[in-house]
Amino acid sequence: MPSPSRHRRLPRLLPLLPWLLLVFLLPGGAGVHAAEPRPFDARYHLEVDGWPNATIEHRLSRDGSQWLSDMRADITLAQGRERSRFLAGEAVRSLHYASGYSLLGVGKRYTLDQDALARLPDRQAALFELSRRATARQCAAPCRLRYLDHRGRETLVEYRLLPRAALSLPAGEFEAVRVEVIEPDEPDRRLRFSFHPGVPGLLLAMEYHRDGERRSRLALTELALPPR
């Protein structure tokens, strides 16, 4: 049974669990190549220090001209989920965002409507756009990002592009586009994302480092890509 202090931390953790506190979107700009979106179904294994291992599922699907991103996390005694609806042109434009968590039958839900998202996007749309821009390598480090978190609060972060690397994962062998993200107010916290170079929004792996130590990691275990 998790300790009371871990119970208190969980409401903060679960709405952010899929990306461990940070998912970011580069603001729209001219001259960035917009990779063609593709639907996918992905499953991941997540290890977090001090918590049971978790399974995360991420589906990107198309609904007419719009795209739907649906992510779910499941750990012992708790579940978390977030969904986003967005348009994917030269820049991503969020239309609706919803997230929630539950712990022992108690939880909370959050939503952002189109009006709230008119100026900045939500973080599920962010995952899609960040991967496209990382693949295009249009920014010299450090790049500055702004997005809305699950409560609709504006957040500023920085990221830098890392060299591509070959990854051997349970789901197969991949060449990965890599990005490191840092919060200016929390320079001891770093997230390293590895994206698929040809499927926007598809995360291959992730590591979270704090105080120079790796505190969690995520790896792709299953992947389904419908034929083009």
Image (cartoon, rainbow, N blue to C red):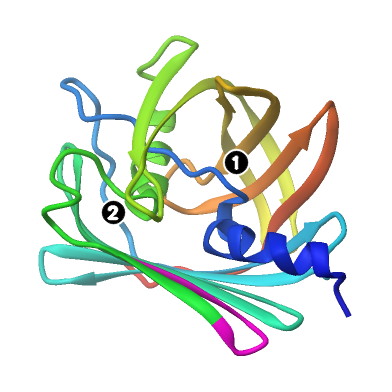
Q: Secondary structure at mark 1?
A: strand
Magenta region, mostly helix, strand or loop?
strand
Q: Residue at x 74, y 69 (%)?
A: 7
* Residue bearing mark 1: 194
| Residue 91 at x, y percent in the picture | 19, 38
Start-end of magenta stretch? 98-106
For the N terminus, the image quarter is bottom right
Determine whether the residue tagged by mark 2 lies in a helix, strand or loop: loop
Q: Residues within 10 Å of mark 1 (few under 14, many from 20)?
A: many
The answer to whether residue 70 of the structure is visible from this angle is no
Viewer can see residue 127: yes
Report the side of 227 relative to 162 (left or right): left
Q: Residue at coordinates 28% horizontally, 41% vertically from top-left?
A: 35
Front-most of residues 200 and 217: 217
Q: Read off the residue under disc 2.
A: 37
- Gap between marks 2 and 1, in whole Å? 17 Å
Please say whether residue 105 is one of the residues in the magenta stretch: yes
- Rendering coords of residue 214 (x, y %): 83, 39
Q: Is residue 88 above or below residue 35?
A: below
109 within the magenta span: no
